[in-house]
Image (spheres, rainbow, N blue to C red):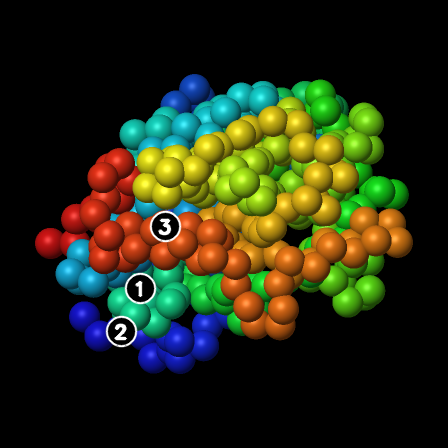
Amino acid sequence: MERANLDWSNLEFQYVKTDYHLEYYFKDGKWSEAKIVENDTIELSIAATSLHYGQQCFEGLKAFEQVSGKITVFRVDENARRMATSARKILMEPFPEDKFIEAVYKVVQLNRRFIPPYGTGASLYVRPLLIGTSGIVGVKPSEEYLFLVFVTPVGPYFKGGLKPIRLLVEEEIDRAAPLGVGDVKVGGNYAAGLRASKKAKSLGYNEVLYLDAKHKKYIDESGPANFLGITKDNKYVTPASSSILPSITNKSLRVLAEKEMGMKVEQRAIDVEEIFDFKEAGCCGTAAVITPVKSITYRDREVVYLNDNEIGEVCRDLYDHLTGIQLGTHEDKYGWNFEVPMD
Ligand SMILES: *Cc1c(COP(=O)(O)O)cnc(C)c1O
């Protein structure tokens, strides 16, 4: 099959329509089989719970063409489990985890022309979405649901790839409350953060760094990515907080830091003042991979970790280990790659 005619090495992180997506419907207490759909729009009740009361959750993961030509998806079992957790938290019908993995394989197979070639730095981003579809105006959980999954070929999330970013500590806007839904992947958290992100960008920063909403003292995460700091004595520290999303990338990096790089890993409350003592910092997520942080601004103080176009040694090593496993140039010791059968 011929590949789509795209400028693979210069893709941005944005939506490109592909050939097909899959839809599954939950109705009368059971999930339907996959429906293969070409049109990338859906028809929905104007009273759907997802539209009015935010009953929706999503996932994000990547498929890669490895150096051997194999097509793999990274830790899809973790995404399947997390989506079910998100769904349960806002009283939605979870999509079965085994069917989730099958759906991801199937949508990648169907859109194989859009899998970026090995060596281009691009990947095929997979976006599963679950929404409440019942038309109910009262506030209660939907009875019917739509699970859909589409793909789009992407380049790096932050323009320039491994280019260091500048963060602004945000104190006037909260992304999520300690006992709210900050720990699940629901769209409302993103809506809550749009103003903060816009403000940071208008001031010349790339993203915000949120503090915990209760004490305004401990680091939570960046808008779409977890935060990690590297201490001068070479510890990997990352926040433990009830209002951040448990990132699968962060979970993977913690293993690599400890097992492959011999670092001590700490997941704990991080006082914002600690940023002034780190030697490196990074943001991590499926989209961001690990993006080095150039500087963090907190009130009237700025800590600068890197010069222009410099990348910290530890972040570079972590990045090489993680992307090496994803692309098959490093051994997959932990069984993180799931091969998509391509026949
Ligand atoms: C998805 C997401 C992340 C990154 O999680 P990964 O599993 O590593 O992709 C981090 N923070 C937020 C708020 C997210 O929604």
> Where is residue 278 shown, x and y percent of the image?
63, 46
| SS at mark 2 in the image | loop
What's the CA distance linking mark 1 and mark 3?
A: 19 Å
Locate the C terminus by quadrant: bottom left
Residue hosting label 1: 115
Label 2 CA crowd tier, 10 Å (few <14, some 14–19, many 20+): few
> Where is residue 57 shown, x and y percent of the image?
56, 36
Label 3 CA crowd tier, 10 Å (few <14, some 14–19, many 20+): many
Residue type marked 3 = Leu
Residue hosting label 3: 322
Please, is residue 84 above or below residue 14 in the view?
above
Label 1 CA crowd tier, 10 Å (few <14, some 14–19, many 20+): many
Identity of the residue drawn at 58% across and 22% down = 89
Residue hosting label 2: 3
Residue type marked 1 = Ile
- Between disc 1 and disc 2, whose residue precedes? 2
Report whether residue 180 is seen: yes
- The residue furthest left is 343
Identity of the residue drawn at 50% across and 25% down = 85
> Where is residue 333 shown, x and y percent of the image?
22, 39
> Where is residue 342 shown, x and y percent of the image?
16, 54
Q: Are marks 1 and 2 in contact (CB under 8 Å)?
A: yes
